[in-house]
Image (tube, helix red, strand yellow):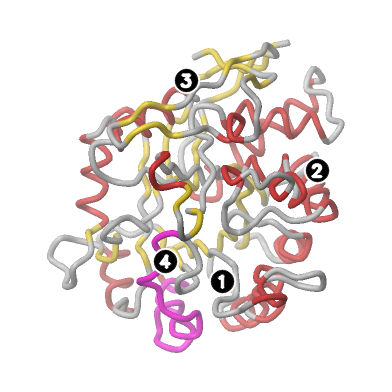
Amino acid sequence: MQIELPKWYDLHVHLRQGDAMKSYIEAQIAMGCTGVLAMPNTSPPVSKVSDSGTGDGWSIEAYSTMIREAGGEAFSDIIVPLYLTGETTSEMIKTGAEKEALKACKYYPPHGTTGAQSAAPFDTYMENGVFAAMEEAGVILCIHGEEHGLSGEHYFGRESNAEEAFYQNRMPGLAQKFPKLKIVCEHITTKIAADFVQQSGDNVAATITPQHLLYTTGDMVQGFKYHLYCLPLVKFERDRQALRDAVTEPGNTKFFAGTDSAPHSAKTKATDCGCAAGCFTAGIAPQLYAQGFEETGLDLSDGKAQETFKRFLCTNGAAFYGLNAADETFTLVKEEQSVQPLETADGKVTPLPLGMGQSTIPWSIKL
């Protein structure tokens, strides 16, 4: 079985910084990416629009240049969101949008994931004019939707968790106050988040990762497969089923691919004081998405099923961000592919399947 597809946009990926960036970009290109939305939780964060801005962070301008110089000139589009910090102002949003240098902003819950220590509480932007300026300028808000500052059972418990609390307590107020704000609910993991997206207007969409289609909490905690440790955490079967239902709906326009591929070398992934959040799926994400779609019971040899898969992987995200569909194509082949660690300047990075004890995956790719 073969499926020919237009090259696709990975609309949530971590390319990091430094010499290893070249390897991460090569892995994106090797899986048919025509463009990326590169996350700004770098070190330092991408907290300025231009080099003329104040503060110690990198600018969108500077980080975009780093990506291009590391091999990203092969991409047709590179979107770098502005990292929202306590120093972000409505004037920054307005000026950046007017100069067409700012397309999206990223909200992180403070200290809620890797590189989120520069973030400010959600209500900061509700009240200081930043979200209002984004709505007026048409700048997209990319949200890591978890409530910050929770502990124990409230963070991840039998009755609720940080993502559910955020979508129940924060998102309705955001949608009511800024009804025209374009929002991407990033890497959603729960039925409650999927329901919120489906019940919202066309200005609200969501990315879904391969791991959240493939795995549940049980897969991670049985033997603690720490290469599956990401934030938000994988959830339960009813949540995975809700995500699978959302992406395989024939008329789906709201859910699209964003891998959240987040590389950590062997020396940084697991440490004496904990585990860094992030699953590495660059190079193999379309193959893993195809595996996930098949595990829902979808027959990808069927033309209608292939069209549903194409919408999720290749067209929905591009349409939401106003990007041009790619002219070039790649081919998914139902043929086993071996999975190897990625050698980088920072050391070896373990792809998710290897971390789950799998040396092969059921799909391969041809460019």
Secondary structure, mark 1, is loop
The disc placed on residue 328 is: 3
Q: Amino acid at mark 1?
A: Lys
Q: Which residue is mark 4?
A: 116
**Looking at numbered disc 2 in the image, what kind of residue is underneath it?**
Glu
Instruction: Name the disc covering residue 249, or none.
Output: 2
Who comes first in sequence, dot 1 or dot 3? 1
Work out which quarter of the rendered image holds the N terminus and state it: top right
Relative to 125, does residue 71 appear above or below in the rendering? above
Tags 3 and 2 touching, CB below 8 Å:
no
Q: CA distance from mark 1 to mark 4?
A: 27 Å
Q: In the image shown, does 202 or 110 lie closer to the viewer?
A: 110
Instruction: Name the outermost residue toward the left.
Output: 52
Mark before the other along the chain sequence, 2 or 4: 4
- What residue is disc 1 on? 180
Spatial distance from mark 3 to mark 4, Cα to Cα?
A: 36 Å
Closer-to-camera residue (222/352): 222
Sequence-first disc among 3 and 4:
4
